[in-house]
Image (tube, coloured by chain):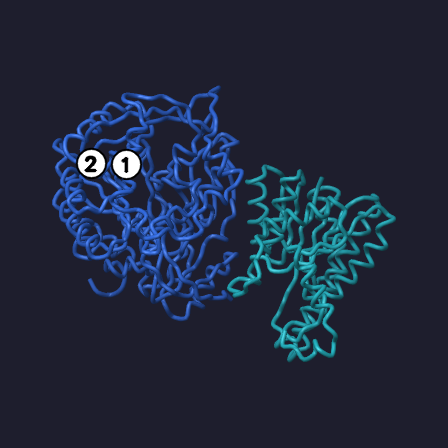
Chain colours: A cyan, B blue
Amino acid sequence: MSALVLGATSRVAHALAHALAARGHDVCVAARDLDEAERVAADVRVRSGRASVALRFDATDFDAHAAFIDSVEAAVGALDTVVLAFGEMGAQADSERNAQAARQVIDVNYTGAVSVCERVAERLISRKRGTIIGVSSVAGDRGRQSNYIYGSAKGAFTLYLQGLRNRLFPLGVHVLTVKLGFVDTRMTWGMSTRIPIAAPEAAAQAILSAAAGGEDVLYYPRFWRGVMTLIGAVPERVFKRLKL
Amino acid sequence: MNRWVEREMYGWGRHPRVRSLVARPERRAEVKAALDDRGGVPILAHGLGRSYGDAALIANGRMVLTRRLDRMLSFDPATGWLEVEAGVSLEEIIRTFVPRGFFPPVVPGTQFVTIGGALGCDIHGKNHHVDGTFADHVRRVELLTGSGEVVVCDAEHEPDLFWATVGGMGMTGIILSLQLKLVPIDNPFIEMESVRVESLDHFFEVSAESGDFTHTVSWIDCVTTGAAMGRGIFMRGRYAPAGTRGSVSLLQRVGQLAPGLLDFRVDGPNWLLNAASIRAFNETYFRKQAKGVTRSTVHYEPFFFPLDNVRQWNRLYGERGFLQYQFVVPPDPEHRAIRQVLAEITRSGLGSFLAVIKEFGERRHPGLSFPAPGTTLALDFGHAGTPLLDLLDRLDAIVLDAGGRVYLGKDARLPRETFRKMYPEWAAWKAVRDHWDPDNVFQSALGQRLGLTGGEA
């Protein structure tokens, strides 16, 4: 079995690479920073004893995505699990002021994700099996003033995964949408909140269990499903007055 | 590039405590960036915070948490050489490699230390008399120096920088990675003998006749006086040969099944560990051990890391925190310094709950590394304020008079002048350090207290 983890230098993705190796996959880890991806691949190799390779992946280099997937499969064999864990939050203020900054956030989180995901889907469809795990965000569930450029890109990605799941289901390919709440990563480092922050390793285990169990949408930590249901239930005429 | 967050930071003794800005880099480029975005103040690497006092702290500077720089980079099963980043813990190495038949060459009393901290403190273990210190099994240390340059150093390459980093308590730079030579083992068990030691002289007799054992250490009752002064339980062991069968302890099982049960999440009351409770514990612990020699086969965890199953045991000392005092004195047939120290502790009425005694082997390298030939004694004291600090000053005088020294990895209060007499190597060490870090980028509360960084001499 072999797996591809895109955006492998994030802590959740790193943990997913380990968890996939522990479940018997040879893992290709890919990220924009090849040096760091090499370290993650080495770590997976040393700890698991399984094969692991690193490749450079740029979400916004759309034209290269087909060749990229070719090189992944040349390295680790036919893929059966692909994790899309890359993303770029950007700074909301930059995205408001600078169209190029906004476009970068949208291209990484959405356009790039769609581009590479379609190339992956082609391969999995031809073999009538496999799993695509898309790591989206609770930020995509409802637009808020503090991060709506990033949120809208993630929201679009969530919608995309929904459609993809609908298309691939009869073809034997499973699509899991993951919406992460607070996980102890660089994004939440230093955040002062009373809401519990989950360990990346626990998130990775939950994600792979959900994928194995055929779940369609996983909120993690799981209570975030309730939180987002409540947030979604607030009428817009009230919501627009909130400072979120 | 780094996000600096204000945190209260402290060592394992939970005294002293400082508030300062800390960053938690996850990538190598972020560690390097910390040199630039540190806001013009000194920085210091901080691992798992298992040094006891102020060695891993800085009040007027910032700390770089290394815990997320934790990738294992390569392993050669033919030789045992393992290359890891500095934030990897010994616990992770042990968990990964015991099933493959390897163990770290030197481990301290807890496995919850990072590799960077292990080299910075140049830790020692129960096998010091045979295998030396941690640094004796290390090569190719990647060190981020004050200029931003990453220098690879070991006994062969840039040896001055390497030996200044060994035991240098983080003041030469930030250790990024190193290679550690793991030793082959046949199974996770230790063939152990416990010997009930009836007096201090008896301890030295047993120690002298334990030459066949690679690992030795002794618990010592430092409350009881008179002829039984120095009584205790001597533990000696070696890796068990192939085919040995053993079992895990009850405490370990509880720890594995329900880790929360053995985790002190709140402070004990300050009075919990007092003279009476310490006396009762020492009496019970000693009585529990049968006279003579007891042989057993034990799992490596209770042998090497008896307290690791009880998470946050340091909180038992209460909110006041505690100090550990560990020293070594040169060999002396009369063992005068050890006797004086034990007598001084008894006279003070400040009992040490945990006390450990061991004979070190030869000193193999220069620098501020602690171990030296002779006898080392480690003592824990709840922080009782002035009476304790006065006691430790008196112990300093005894240790200094005997030609000994205290361990900086445990220290929170050693006066500068005393330190300089105990470690006459300090000036040579500082010259190397200053050469590599002329701008004093890397500082610690301990280093400032002892005059190890900065312009003054």
Q: Position of residue B192 (x, y in %)?
A: 36, 25
Q: Amino acid at mark 2?
A: Thr
Image quadrant in which you'd find residue A24: top right
Image quadrant in which you'd find residue A7: bottom right
Q: Are marks 2 and 1 in contact (CB under 8 Å)?
A: yes
Q: Describe residue B190's horizontal placement relative to residue B430 as left or right.
A: right
Q: Is residue A12 above or below residue B189?
A: below
For disc 2, the chain is: B
Image quadrant in which you'd find residue A198: bottom right
Which residue is nearer to you in this view: A228 or A205? A228
Q: Amino acid at mark 1?
A: Asn
Q: Residues within 10 Å of mark 2 (few under 14, many from 20)?
A: some
Q: Residue at x 25, y 58 (%)?
A: B452
Q: Secondary structure at mark 2?
A: loop
Disc 2 marks which residue? Answer: B224
Disc 1 marks which residue? Answer: B282
Q: Residue at x 44, y 40 (%)?
A: B309
How many numbered markers are drawn? 2
Q: Describe residue A129's horizontal placement relative to residue A234 as left or right.
A: right
Q: Position of residue B31 (x, y in %)?
A: 47, 59
Q: Quadrant of the C terminus of chain B?
A: bottom left
The Cα atoms of the two marked residues, 2 and 1, are separated by 9 Å
Q: Is residue B157 visible?
A: yes
